[in-house]
Image (spheres, rainbow, N blue to C red):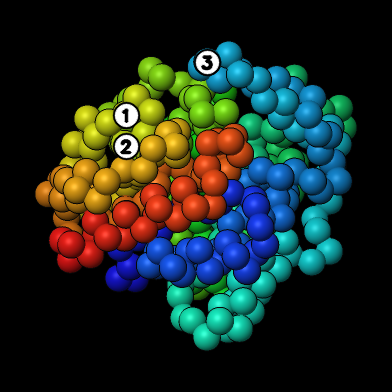
Amino acid sequence: MTFKTTHVGSLPRTGSIQEIIKMQIDTGIEEVNDGEFRRSIYFGNVTNLKGFTQGVYPVEFSAGDLFMSPLVTGPIQPPEIPLAAKEVSATRFYLSEMGVQRRVKITVPSVSMMLAFYPPQGVEGYPRATYISDILEILKGEARAAFQAGADTVQFDAPTLLLAQTFYQDLKELVSLDNELIDNVKGLGTTMVHGCFGNGWNTQISTTVRYASLVPDLLGLHSDIIGPLEVWDGIRMGSELDAFRDSGKRFAIGIVSVKSRNVEPVEVLKGRYEMCKNVLGDDVIVSPGCGFASAPETIHSLEGTKRKLSNLCKAVAVLD
């Protein structure tokens, strides 16, 4: 587990999967995937299962943009074949075809994320506790199958950990449920938990929550790595990095913004990486702050994404 660079998961959904994988190889990034090419959104493979109804609940971002979220409307049914494992297998296949070795990462929604889709008023005949039990088993199956298919890292996407107050949820309960999922795959590979403050058309849900108030609970996560976390993204320009000091945990820190089309120069990223190392130690991992596909297609082209990731890798290489 010596890698230094990664990305969050989603990449511009243009071209082909082969082109997306080759783009990552060309940048030097140490973990690659299929860019979530087949998913409409990072949780879309799971929320397409029977029991979810699409586009029925409005979620408002800080700039007033609306996302019409899916909701649980009845008992959910597990997939016949694990969804994430198919993505891992495809990525491994294309890497083999190219004759290249890289770590393979796959993203799986966390339990805390999936709880955001259960309506506050409940679902008749399908209690919240039953839904939690059902989704936990589905996600356990997804994560285990992903590792068995050849994933080196499974990243559990958990923005609602940072937005628990926004979604009127208890952070301690969310961490506990995510730990039950993480513990089920301990020892099979590297586990990460990605949190963000809600990207939607280049905005955030929350511009008020600060890491300092969340760190005591986040440190209770059982994952090998906490992150990637947005620390240089949007309104968070590195000022909150100190909240993680002396925690004894390994972190992945987002030093590249997906909220801007502008490509950060290597010298700028070098300074951010150096600050991360000074605060969190030499084993810190750096990445973009969130997924590139969380911004509109007009923001990030495949070429622009390549330049951002390339500069990230160059900044790390200068110091390491």
Which residue sits at x=50%, y=25%?
Answer: 203
- For label 2, the residue is 231
Q: Quadrant of the N terminus?
A: bottom left
Q: Residue at x 34, y 24 (%)?
A: 235
Estimate the x, y position of residue 147 in percent, counting from the top left. Answer: 57, 71
Q: Nearer the viewer, mark 2 or mark 3?
A: 3
Identify whether 20 is placed above or below 99: above
Quarter location, residue 257: top left
Secondary-structure class at tag 1: strand
Residue, disc 1: 236
Say which quarter of the image contains residue 55: top right
Which SS class for mark 3? loop
The residue where tag 3 is placed is 63
Q: Earlier in the sequence, mark 1 or mark 2?
A: 2
Crowding at mark 1 (Cα within 10 Å: few <14, some 14-19, many 20+) = some
Amino acid on which disc 2 is placed: Val
Q: In the image shown, does 154 or 14 lie closer to the viewer?
A: 14
Q: Residue at x 45, y 60 (%)?
A: 191
